Image: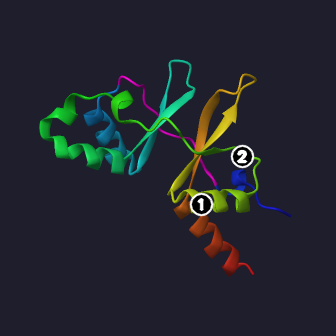
């Protein structure tokens, strides 16, 4: 049986609005011990992502970054997968794009994406350890 993203992903995701202050985004990352927050529009559809790396890059601007909103710092091209996709394809995508996580989405009929979870390198490593222990 082929493993899917749904078998390994972390269900649920902390999101923020485009007008959320970066200072608040940094606090939410710290409080939830997460390294990225998807940015969603008013209807809850994915429009970007902010990572800890994005925030660290902005620290060079000293106090200025504290006045910025999520939409100013977010990456608009978010790499996503759906729960039904094969896990191997997701692993290959992570490696090819040299990223640490994929946002798991449920697309609607128009193609807009609603984030429902995250598949991280940590999730995949945990799955590999579990598989090895049960082999």
Per the picture, the main secondary structure of the magenta-coloured stretch is loop
Please give left or right for residue 44 compared with residue 86 in the image.
left
Please tell me which residue is depicted at 58% across the width and 63% down the height of the picture.
Answer: 95
Residue 102 image offset from top left, x and y in percent: 57, 50
Please tell me which residue is depicted at 29% across the width and 40% down the height of the picture.
Answer: 27
- Tell me if label 2 and label 1 are in contact, CB under 8 Å: no
Q: Mark 1 points at which residue?
A: 96
Residue 92 image offset from top left, x and y in percent: 66, 62
Q: Residues within 10 Å of mark 1 (few under 14, many from 20)?
A: few
Give 93 or 128, whichever is nearer the viewer: 93
- Residue furthest to the top: 42
Q: Name the residue under label 2.
A: 83
Q: What element carries label 2?
A: loop
- Magenta extent: 9-19
Give 20 or 75, whichever is nearer the viewer: 75
- Quadrant location of the N terminus? bottom right
Residue 5 image offset from top left, x and y in percent: 70, 53
Magenta-colored stretch includes residue 55: no
Please give left or right for residue 54 compared with residue 86 in the image.
left
């Amino acid at each position: 049986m082929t493993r899917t993203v749904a078998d390994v992903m972390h269900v649920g995701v902390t999101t923020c609005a485009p007008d959320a202050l970066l200072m608040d985004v940094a606090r939410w990352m710290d409080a939830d011990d997460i390294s990225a927050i998807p940015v969603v529009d008013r209807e809850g559809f994915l429009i970007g992502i902010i990572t800890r790396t994005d925030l660290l890059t902005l620290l060079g601007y000293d106090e200025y970054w504290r006045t910025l909103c999520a939409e100013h710092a977010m990456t608009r091209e978010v790499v996503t997968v759906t729960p039904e996709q094969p896990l191997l394809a997701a692993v290959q995508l992570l490696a090819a794009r040299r990223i640490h996580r994929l946002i798991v989405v449920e697309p609607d009929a128009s193609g807009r994406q609603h984030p429902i979870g995250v598949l991280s390198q940590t999730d995949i490593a945990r799955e590999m350890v579990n598989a090895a222990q049960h082999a």
